[in-house]
Image: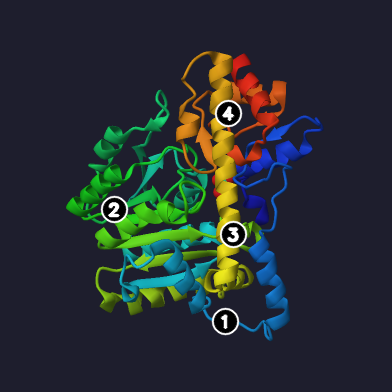
Amino acid sequence: MLGNLKSQPADKILALMTKFKEDPRIQKVDLGVGVYKNAEGVTPVMRAVKAAERRLVEEQTSKSYVGLPGDPAFADAMIDLVLGDSVQRDRIAAIATPGGTGAVRQAFELVKMANPDARVFVSNPTWPNHVSILKFLGIPTIEYRYFDTESRAVDFEGMLEDLADAKAGDVVLLHGCCHNPTGANLNITQWQSVIDLINEKGLIAMVDIAYQGFGNGLDEDAEATRLVASSVKEVLIAASCSKNFGVYRERTGLLMAISDDAELTPIVQQNLNYLNRQNYSFPPDHGARVVTMILTDPELRADWAAELEEIRLGMLELRQQLADELQKLSGSDRFGFIAEHRGMFSQIGTTPDKVEQLRADNGIYMVGDSRMNIAGLNKDTVPLLAKAIVDAGI
Ligand code: LMR
């Protein structure tokens, strides 16, 4: 049996992580995987996370099973963080999941169970694992135009034109903020137009929000998701705590499913619980408990929000420094988009060959689609990157 297995395509982002580790050069810069790193290149445990973990060690009296949807207090705290009071609580069913990826996977499985004919519309480009999971599940996937490679901004007209092909019951996958991989985002007026189209055509909205707090601020980054949640009849939201709480390896995420009518919530909840049971029984609890403790303790929450804000502002400074440096070296404004983009990533919009050249000649690692992780830079490596980009004729 095992001899029948075929090799699977390597995940581009994870393959790059390995390649970087194996590179013996001392002067190398990792702009690959979406993990925050400070100026020393370290991914720190956030202060509030450490404090909550200490408290957990002291106070936790059992590690027995919690429940199929995870701790309800985690769902409540995360719903409050992501949605505020934009949606009536009794319209929302939710399950804890292993990270944001777990939430995305469960959401797609729910779509398949509820409507086997549904197609999922994804941005071109999107996080490669969206497409990979959809393919694995055999869900028809259609790309909509999203990124204008000339202006490096959203191709909004193209997006609306392509979404106009969707049929009632199809799902539109949107990035709540900090679009991955491009860094280019819709403004709120554009979000409203997308919502209008979704409602006109009877589509289902799905929002992946994995970088809340990395763009314009915690509430600002949730604004679009809240608008979708409060204006579309049926919405799925996959939220990740990996980045904004820095709990990557703890696998902490939440899937929310919002029904039009609160009467549907129990059956939706029951299906979500069922999906957890089929896939892994109980979702991981450690990270979820830490996050809950932080969000419900005013002191821990304030400290967490302050540290996240430092991280966000640090990334904005790096963006500005890089845009300025490129302006100086290239004598042109064509890299101004780097300061305009938001979140951890910017797609600089060059060919895989040039990306490979940057790696071979300068030890600079970015994903083949020219996505770079801004948090992989520091004040000293920004000038090196800028020079390498200009030298490569990008
Ligand atoms: C990324 O896009 O680099 C992150 O979301 C990490 C991952 O799992 O791909």
Residue at screen point 46% across, 20% down: 334
Measure the C-alpha gap from mark 1 to mark 4. Answer: 47 Å
According to the picture, the residue beneath numbered tag 3 turns out to be 245
Q: Quadrant of residue 372?
A: top right
Measure the C-alpha gap from mark 2 to mark 4. Answer: 40 Å
How many marks the image carries: the answer is 4
According to the picture, the residue beneath numbered tag 2 turns out to be 170
Label disc, if present, on residue 199 of the rendered structure: none
Instruction: Say if residue 98 shows up in the picture.
Output: no
Measure the C-alpha gap from mark 4 to mark 3. Answer: 26 Å
In the image shown, does 77 or 150 lie closer to the viewer? 77
According to the picture, the residue beneath numbered tag 4 turns out to be 322
Q: What kind of element bears circle 4?
A: helix
Mark toward the start of the polypeptide (2 vs 4)? 2
According to the picture, the residue beneath numbered tag 1 turns out to be 66
The quadrant of the picture occupied by the N terminus is bottom right
Mark toward the start of the polypeptide (1 vs 2)? 1
In the image shown, does 376 or 148 lie closer to the viewer? 376
Q: Residue furthest left?
A: 200
The percent coordinates of residue 5 (x first, y second) are 62, 50
Mark 1 vs mark 2, foreground winner is 1
Mark 3 vs mark 1, foreground winner is 3
Q: Residue furthest bottom?
A: 61
Q: What kind of element bears circle 1?
A: loop
Mark toward the start of the polypeptide (1 vs 4)? 1
Mark toward the start of the polypeptide (2 vs 3)? 2
Measure the C-alpha gap from mark 2 to mark 3. Answer: 32 Å
Mark toward the start of the polypeptide (3 vs 1)? 1
Residue type beneath disc 1: Val
